[in-house]
Amino acid sequence: MTVSLSGGPDGDWDLAAFRRPGSAAVAASTAFGSDEQLTVAVNSGDRLAVQACRRSGGGPAAVPLRFDFYEMDASAPADGRISLESVSISGPSELARLERLGLDVTHDVSEEAATVALYSARERARLAAAGFSATTLIPDLAAEDAADRRSEGLATRVAAASPLPSGRESYRVYNDYTSRMKAIAENNARLVRPVVLGRTFEDRPIQGVEIATDVRRTDDGRPVYLNMGLHHAREWPSGELPMEFALDLVRGFRNGNARIRSLLERVRVIIVPVVNVDGFIASRSYGTSPADDDSLATLPFAINDQAAYKRKNCRPTVPGSAAMPCALRSNSGVDLNRNYGAYWGGSGSSSDRTAQSYRGTGPYSEPESQAVHAFTASLHPTVFITNHTFTSDGKWLRQPGFDDVIKVTPDEPAMKDLGDDMAGTTGWTSELGYATLGDITGATEDWNYFSQGTYGYTPEVRGTNFHANYADSVVEE
Ligand SMILES: [Zn+2]
């Protein structure tokens, strides 16, 4: 069941669904403004109360509310065992051949091996038939994920507190992001300002926070530092890190931390933790049932680029898939990190609508990448960080992301210095973008570098899979 409230950008309405009066909400939507959407799995006969709440004025006194239902088959797909394999390769041409097999090649690539997610016995057979040799890293990824979610759930139930600014022990759902952004903006009005970049394919606002002293000034000309996450839906740690960074800045400022105060006087920091909002909701929350409150509910639906392992956005690119919910479409969507305009359509992107690296029909064809582009084009960002997962050693990748125009940028010495510093702090490697991952074109920060001189970095967070155990993949990193 999807419930939508369409009140526009003014005022602030929120939306929540409850199973019993006084119980915690089973689903909620807490965007800035008055456009809200929540999705929740219900069984025949379930009773829910849906509450729309006008939190502050200025907006409409009454707003349209809409209910949509999609009847879904809850049975697991046949032979749905997903494995993570390390496939031996001997260079970029073998990596390209692997991608042409239509397999899900992850970001974890070295000169000798690429980590590949295989979603069925058929895919495992296809890999072997093509002459590749593979070593299994995780034989049953869904089972491993389930174990990780259970241990995170246990840590949360015993009220353990991690050393993160939030103290969290488990991955946020989307509503956790929006609620917290709203809270820090409301409680720190001179320091934190809500920003809305645009809307997603499914018409959700893409939002973030701007953090700076006297944040509402418009005449100071301070440089801008951008930090974004979750272009790729299944890479849950990539949203946690920018969100925790936002909380760290606010807490440090309030506690009188001299370094953070000085930083926020000199620089405007803009943090957008979730760019691919639709995809993240499909990956993190789809199928969550109020009947059993099962946080593992997306796993049975997890097959190729679907549900928990969805990477791309929610445009239905596979014929016949438009009628079903985003989370249930296999292989559909556009890879937002191949859809940006600089050198769009070049190497390391695909024109195949089912491919994981499908670049879309044209530069900025997707509302999410267009929104980020239009927003950043009006700023003067000096550094732009877009977070991704996962690599086994952790990487700070810098411009350029491909070597067919220039092998190194004119800014290489300074960009390398900064990348090396960040790598030294995190204990990861510092590399040119194409060095081991191979060429990628149409990536997020390319246009900002080539047009604005923005130093662009892609952190590939260290980990063992897309969203492995929170303590390891988020707290430790
Ligand atoms: Zn990614």
Image (spheres, helix red, strand yellow):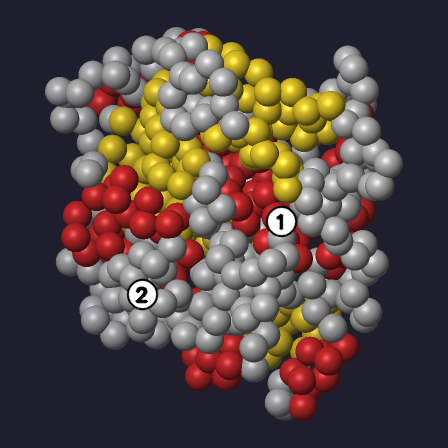
Q: Nearer the viewer, residue 440 or 80?
A: 80
Q: Residues within 10 Å of mark 2 (few under 14, many from 20)?
A: few
Give the x, y percent position of residue 115: 60, 68
Q: Against 29, is 72 above or below?
A: below
Q: Which mark is residue 362?
A: 2
Amino acid on which disc 2 is placed: Gly
Q: Nearer the viewer, mark 1 or mark 2?
A: 2
Residue 114 is labelled as: none
Q: Residue at x 72, y 84 (%)?
A: 125
Answer with mark 1 or mark 2, whichever residue precedes in sequence.
1
* Secondary structure at numbered mark 2: loop
Q: Residue at x 52, y 54 (%)?
A: 314
Q: Split into 4 quadrants, where in the image is the N terminus?
A: top right
Image location (x, y in percent) of residue 439: 37, 70
Q: Secondary structure at mark 1?
A: helix
Disc 1 under 8 Å from ligand 1? The reply is no
Q: Residue at x 28, y 17 (%)?
A: 215
Provide residue 244's location: percent of width, then percent of height: 51, 29
Q: CA distance from mark 1 to mark 2?
A: 25 Å
Q: Amino acid at mark 1?
A: Ser
